[in-house]
Amino acid sequence: MNEDARVAAITGGAQGIGKAIALRLLHDGWSVILLDANDAALAAAEKDLRAFGTVTAITADVGDAEQLTRAFDRIAETTPTGLNALVNVAGIMVSAPPEELTLADWNRVIAVNLTGAFLAARLAAPLLRRRGGAIVNIASTRAAMSEAHTEAYSASKGGLVALTHALAISLGPDVRVNAVSPGWIDVSRWGSPTDARTPEDLTTEDHAQHPVGRVGRPEDIAALAVWLAGPDAGFVTGQEFTVDGGMTRKMIYA
């Protein structure tokens, strides 16, 4: 890995928003380290992205403390001069009525979406301090508003926003920490060959209900996340940035 290049580690970097952030960083001259639990998606992402710059892929389930520790041990070995950024994207959703949501599912969502972000930040902190780096947490507008049956996911993202400002105070001034809360983002073009999900069939109404006139794209999140990770955002820390096409500012009356 080029020791002079800016280096970012991205959890959940193999697909969706994580992959879009990786591509934007590569276009801007960064080197990227992708961490993901999905081996097949990780291999496909590494192959796709290597055409644009230096990419390292590490298999790791952020919900597993031992796996995450091993991953950051490897990062420390391969990037002895440190990290410029950690981007916490990894997240899962389990949707079920509260009466039916199992404790195991609750714990798994919290482990991946919230505890995993904390552990990654804790493990990355020494590496980030060496370069005066930044952490960008990808939260969600569900931290502030909900659909039914999303208790675990909403709680994890609300916790992630609070974790963001707590880390900003604890790790400053050496490390800046901010959060991006996406709204409706169509990630269908950013999957992997192994992704069995059906692409979203977006309607005119889906787009029109957004004040900006369209559903969001991963590139929208990547643009802000990469700015927050870099030196131009040097006076910004502890903040949450909502990127939702204006939906959370729209009054909706039946």
Image (spheres, rainbow, N blue to C red):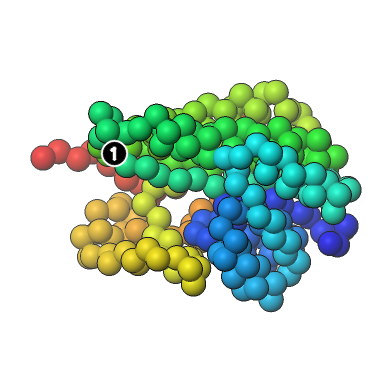
Q: Is residue 233 visible?
A: no
Residue furthest left in the image: 254
Residue furthest bottom in the image: 51
Residue 207 rendering spot, x and y as whole percentages: 28, 60
Using the image as rendered, state which of residue 207 and residue 23 is in the foreground.
23
Classify 33 as above or below 125. Answer: below
Residue 243 rendering spot, x and y as whole percentages: 44, 47
Residue 173 rendering spot, x and y as whole percentages: 76, 29
Q: Is residue 213 visible?
A: yes
Task: Please indicate whether residue 117 sits to the left or right of residue 202 in the image.
Answer: right
Q: Secondary structure at mark 1?
A: loop
Q: Kindly identify the residue that appears in the image at 58 percent across and 53 percent down.
A: 37
Q: Kindly identify the residue that appears in the image at 59 percent across and 70 percent down.
A: 44
Q: Check disc 1 and give the amino acid type.
A: Ala
Residue 86 rendering spot, x and y as whole percentages: 68, 45
Q: Kindly identify the residue that appears in the image at 81 percent across and 41 percent down.
A: 127
Using the image as rendered, state which of residue 251 and residue 116 is in the foreground.
116
Q: Kindly identify the residue that appears in the image at 24 percent across and 54 percent down.
A: 209
Task: Please indicate whether residue 180 sits to the left or right of residue 166 in the image.
Answer: left
The residue labelled by disc 1 is: 96
